[in-house]
Amino acid sequence: MSAIPQNLQVVRDGIAAAARIALRDPQSVQLLAVSKTFDAAAVVAAAQAGQRAFGENYLQEALDKMAAVKAAQPDLLLEWHFIGPIQSNKTRQIAEHFDWVHAIDREKIAQRLSDQRPSALPPLNICLQINISGEASKSGATLEQAPKLAQAIAALPRLRLRGLMAIPEAAESVALQRLPFHRLHQLWQALREQGLDLDTLSMGMSNDMTAAIAEGATIVRIGSAIFGKRDYAK
Ligand SMILES: *Cc1c(COP(=O)(O)O)cnc(C)c1O
């Protein structure tokens, strides 16, 4: 039997507990199940246990999985989030097949997604990725670039800028994990004060979810705690 329904319940309980400690409504934290490297059967198992939103990093893998899920369960209404880095030659299929994109850090990519978003679909939901730990090797806009980039993205007609996303450097303790999430929340607040209509902070993964929720995460992106350890060799 699959462990996915039980794992999902453990993660949901963890979200609710972290929210209660932070004096937040557990309903204010959405669970995004990150299904990269896991197959369509894993997605179906999670969906049958009530999970609706799924995150994917690799375009071809995601498109194949969406088709397989649809073939197996045509009536499932799922929400798909693209959370990986995006190359410009991939924007059309992302604009056509996803509901959300979390890792935008360049205006050029955002412009292409807006141009390519089919008119029959609602605007594509966008999070701007911020390199919150300032690591030279990591993607994401800098804190300094963020205000101008956010204003530019918010002005694109077929996108809806929802908020910010970050993947901080690993840290030892919950207290240390909270620092970069706190900085992201402060930037988010500053952008809202500049008039941007943001409602989303996409932050927190399996290992730092509690710290992220304490600092105001509205979407946590959880993979291994739901689906198990990833095997990239497959
Ligand atoms: C893989 C991935 C996750 C999930 O990570 P886990 O540690 O398995 O919870 C979350 N966000 C992004 C951007 C990812 O690439």
Image (cartoon, rainbow, N blue to C red):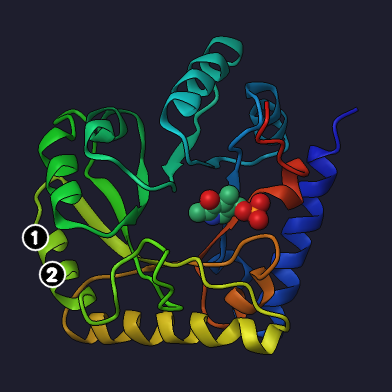
Q: Give percent across and percent down for residue 188.
A: 33, 79
Instruction: Report the amino acid beneath label 2.
Output: Gln
Residue at image point 8% right, 60% down: 155
- Say the numbered circle drawn on residue 151: 2
Against 168, residue 21 (above or below) is below
Where residue 46 sits in the image (x, y, percent)? 69, 36
Q: Quadrant of the N terminus?
A: top right
Viewer can see residue 23: no
Q: Residue furthest top?
A: 71
Q: With respect to residue 92, does 5 lie above or below?
A: below
Left or right? Give the position of 183 relative to 170: left
For the point 23% across and 82% down, the residue is 144
Q: Residue at x 29, y 27 (%)?
A: 93
Amino acid on which disc 1 is placed: Ala
Please name the residue shown 24% across and 80% down the image.
191
Q: Is residue 12 left or right of residue 1?
A: left
Quarter of the image holding residue 97? Answer: top left
Instruction: Give the residue number, with chain letter if any, for mark 1.
Output: 155
x, y percent for residue 88: 22, 38
Q: CA distance from mark 1 to mark 2?
A: 6 Å
The foreground one among 23 and 5 is 5
Q: How busy is the neighbourhood of tag 2: few (under 14 within 10 Å), some, or many (20 plus)?
A: some
Q: Residues within 10 Å of mark 1 (few under 14, many from 20)?
A: few
Q: Assess whether mark 2 and mark 1 are in contact (beta carbons under 8 angstroms).
A: yes
In the current view of this chain or complex, which residue is farthest to the right?
1
